[in-house]
Amino acid sequence: MAQLSVEDLVVTYGSVTAVKDVSFVVEDGEFVSLLGPSGCGKTTTLRCIAGLEASSGGTIRIDGEIVAADGRDVPPEKRDINMVFQSYAVWPHMTVYENVAYGLKTRHEPAAVIEAKVSEALRTVGLTGYSDRYGTELSGGQQQRVALARAIVTSPRLLLFDEPLSNLDAGLRDRMRFELVELQRRLGKTSLYVTHDQSEAMLMSDRIILMKDGKMVQSGTPRDLYDRPASRFAAEFIGNANILEGTVAGTAGGKHALVTLTDGVTIEGRFSWPAQSTVFGLVLVCIRAESIILVTSGSKAVNCFEAHVKSVNFLGAVVNCLLQIGGVALRADLPARNPPHVGQTIMVRIDPEAVTLISEH
Amino acid sequence: MKNTNGLPRCNFTRRNLMRMAAVTGLGAASLSLFPKGALAQSPAPQPSEDLVAAAKAEGTLTFYHTTAIDPTAVWTGAFTKKYGITTQNVRGPSYPLFERWLTEERVGQHVADVIQITDTVLIESAHDEKLIADYTPASAAGIRPEMKKEGVWYTAFVNAMGIAWNSKLVSPEEEKLIREGGWNVLTDPRWKGRIATGTPASGGSSYSYVYMFLGGKRDQFGPDFLAKMAALKPQIYDSKSPMYDRLAAGEHAIVDQASQSDMGGFYLKGAPIRWVFPTPTPANLTVQTISAGAPHPNAARLFQDWAMSEEGQAAWFSVAGVASAREDTVDPRKAAKADWYKEEWYKDPENLYIDYLSDPGYVDPAKPIIAEWNQIFGR
Amino acid sequence: MTISATIPVTDNVPVGLVRRKRQRLALPVIVGLILAVLVLLPIVLMFLGAVRTGTFVDPRAHFSLRSVIAVYATMPYLKTLIVTIGASLAVSFLACFVGIALAWLISRTDIPAKAWMENAVIAPLYLSPFVGALAWLILGSPNAGLINVLAREVFGVTGYAINVMTATGVILVMALYNIPYAYMTVSAALKGMDPSMEEASYLNGAGVFSTALKVTLPVVRPSIISAFFFVFVLTCGTFSIPAALGGTQAMPFLAIDIYRATATYPVDYARAAAIGTLLFWISLIGVAFYRFASQVATRFVTVTARGFRTRFLKLRGWRIPAIGFILAYVTLAIILPYFALFYVAFTRFTSSNILTASYTLDNFRSVIASVAVRQSIGNTLLVGVISPTFCVLLGIVLAYSIRRLRIRGAGILDYIAMFPIAVPGIVFGTGIFWTYLMTPVYGTVWILVIAFVATYIPYAYRMIDTSIIQIDRSLEEASALCGASHFRTASQITFRLIRPSVLSAWILVFIFSIREISAAIILASPSNKVLSVMSWDYLEFGNVQNAAIIGILQTVILMAGILVSRFLLRVKLSQSG
């Protein structure tokens, strides 16, 4: 097991900078996700850590040992780490057994040890009995398990995952998420996981590093990122948030402030990052759809509004409604039991704690 | 048939030679036609024992030749059998083969020992460049004087060229016309679309053949004669041999440049081919020379000795039906009136045209008649 | 944010750290040198040769633009150039048209016995093109051609039914022997194409032919273009087929002019080289198109681990005409030519009448007894095994260096490796002759090996390169992350995955090497005679019988070689789907 540390990582291709000054630490046994839209540099960062991509600057350490510094790199095969690829990368010319045994054979381990470790790994991923199949004879999910078994069988210091579930269909993906997390917890491997799927990152990670345009924008526990987005990008990327523009009208005690939205609607919110607290000027108001709750009409509590229901979409457990509050349009997830009707006027409340103010444009 | 030993050499030789000599055009008078009486009795000159021993020590030689692959292999096989010296035979079209040998010698890649070619002009040019070994084989004394350049090249075979036809595609009247009409028969409009010929650029024999028409006997034939032939739109071959095959197959009814050795081969296979040698009959010398840089100089000399000897010449008769350059050797088949010699239609050439070898027009390295021929035939 | 405190970067960098850029200097130099000597030098010598009046070692030769001016600026050559280009385009068009039709029928319809059909379609590759031309001469010459004799005697045709000794005849015969190349290229693309594209077209109401024309063909268009220019370039430099079918009397052709300049008096290498340079420029344009199209084609091909479940189109009433079309092709390209060759091989002399011909086994006896033939069988086998092996090895090194190690100058190397396609074999052979004249390999079989490796490196390289491009990078990266060294990754993963195309490349170069004639003629020596040269020599001497037997012998060697190589290099990939 090992700690991974990345400092000031820079990757440039000619004049294009793909990764700028990325620094983070993954503690021993921790599961960290690199999350961001495609092209944000998360995969490049991962591939630098794997040694598949040359770094242009910065330092990468695994277990305190420098594997990349100032544009010099230890080749991937000398890093004692392993990776699960988006495309599974199961070798089509080898059987499942040969795929998994490959890394052990590379290390010239005794045949008996290889045998034992491979069966153990196959058992761990639930592929006992598939040893003699060829990779191409398996389903996508099974191939992914082969890739996983191949990655864990060498007991790497660090496990890397490059969007491993994105090629699977939805149901299987959900199941594999839980299995992966469960496996990671059981093995206690330091893991770095790249995904563009925020719910996957939220569900699996101890910590999420959010990236955009080659830079880290925010890092923290899933809860942190959800509750306290530090930027419009973070708020939009994680969770289903309504982002409105407003002007600070005054404080409401502590970190709370009153904000006037367009059309004069005033709402009380909270600055999630004290450093951003301000008493005047423009702010972004971030309201998650699930934070809007239906209250009995005539309620006078803080942040209660009369809303006109413009549309109702059934999603199963909830209905997603488009509400009109004054001149402001909001999407709200309301309980599917007794849903409002289109054209109805209802009363909703938004907890000030759930109204996040971000002083960034 | 293959064993030539003990054949009644003298008489037939004499008769044959008389005929050959009589026809050698202008030079005929100067030829010594009658073998000296002593020649028949005295044993043929043999190569020295030292040479044989040195050649055997070398054990092999490389022979660049222009004659057909299989007959040549049989011929050199007789040499190997006698001396135990193997030969590496490389067959090539005259000009490229000689050009290659020149290049090899010039850069010091000595591969060939003996070079055979149908064009004496090129050999003499190489001799000027000091690429030819001076060697006079003892046996070459028997080679007719006009068929050798002492110390440089010696004629291995003499090949007469005439007109050949496919007897299945030619009516009896037409056959009579060919046999009696001389060279002019080649310009007869009846052959339009039925005749084929070969380019003089393909090698020494075709060149010598065309030289008679455009060079040596220009007054008699000349461009007008060839223009009439060209008007018949003959199929033109870059190499004569495939032309003979197509003649046998019936693609063409009549071809010129028909050489005795090739026609004899087709005759023996049963092909419906007949041939005639109109007068004068152009003949071509296939000559051999030794490379100055020969990697096996003794084997080369011994081979040259053997090739020019009665024995070597007789061995060639067993594989091809050409005339010998020796006064004392004659094709045994002819002696026995065997094969085509027995045919009613066959007649030996009567007037061999061979004294062109030192004509300025012939030895001109630019070979201007080739360009002239090309123009006449629209090449 | 939980960005860790900065850890100072130490100056003493651990041993394992490698500066990546440095390790890639030796390799491009070595690979570049190999290519320069193998490919560039002969071409440079060709250009130099064009401005000399004689050979390089001829003491009387000097520099002169005479040949270049004559070839580039006088009417006969320019006319020949236009005819050459026109005829080659016609050959490409015909070969591609038939090749595409065959490829579509075999890979997209429910035509029966596909494996047999496919083998039959590519079978003409096993025959030396000029032996094939010889066969067609026997079959279709106007007077003595077997077909014409039959037509006259049985059907009472006057004159002739076909005549291969015309421009049309030469073009048709050349097209016939190029169809397999068009077929192989297009069929590979069709097999790699996702059939759902066609299914989508059917669902949109398009019929079979409209789908083929509007969806299938456009999708495989890059392969078609690539096949077209491949055949074009190959045809431009072919001298043996037009030479065997009546030479310039049938049709002026630059390659024949080259051959004539090297084989007839006056032997003029400068003229041959000058015509060679002219053909080089034309072919280079073709190569540029071919190179571009084959790269695009690679991008178009969808390669996935999952096999397609191809649904074959039901031909129904078209089944009989379709089978008839394939059978007609097989008859023209295989049955008739081999019939002619076997017929001739057993006759004493070529006769136009099968009934009255005199048959014999003597030809076989004499060929088998011939020491020269036996030696050349040995040489052919030696060259035939070593050349494709070296060629494929060099192709692997090149493709791996260019695609995987991304060495410096990769783009230039990629171009140079394609050059030999643009040089007619006979001119390239002359260039190789000059390059190695003063070295010990001259006159040995090794000069043929060098010549064939140099001549065919473009084919081996392109095929291997294409398959390396198609390998998902992550398959190799996974190996590195499993701890495997560069070498182990290359040997265990990359080379295993490209093995099918290495096998194809080997077989293709093997076929070429056994059949090659142009360069072999120029480089023939006592100790390196090969069968193709023997067969040409026999033909030159009018011994069509022995030439045919050697042609048949080559076919036997080719088929045996392909069977053995398939067995030795058998591909152990699982069945997909």
Image: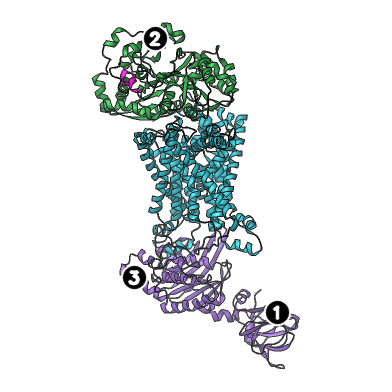
Q: CA distance from mark 3 to mark 1?
A: 64 Å
Which residue corresponds to mark 3? A115
Q: Position of residue B42 (x, y in %)?
A: 26, 11
Residue sitting nearer the eye, A326 or B337 = B337
Which chain is drawn using purple? A
- The quarter of the image holding the N terminus of chain C is bottom right
Q: Position of residue B127 (x, y in %)?
A: 40, 19
Chain letter for the residue marked with disc 3 in the picture: A
Which stretch did the figure color magenta?
B306-316
Which residue corresponds to mark 2? B18
Tally of marks: 3
Which residue corresponds to mark 1? A246
- Residue C374 is left or right of residue A320, and the answer is left
Labels 3 and 1 touching (C-beta < 8 A): no
Q: Is residue A101 visible?
A: yes
Label 1 Cα neighbours within 10 Å, binned few <14 / some 14-19 / many ≥20: many
Residue drawn at 39 percent across, 40 percent down: C380
Closest to the camera, between mark 2 and mark 3, is: 2
Which chain is drawn using green? B
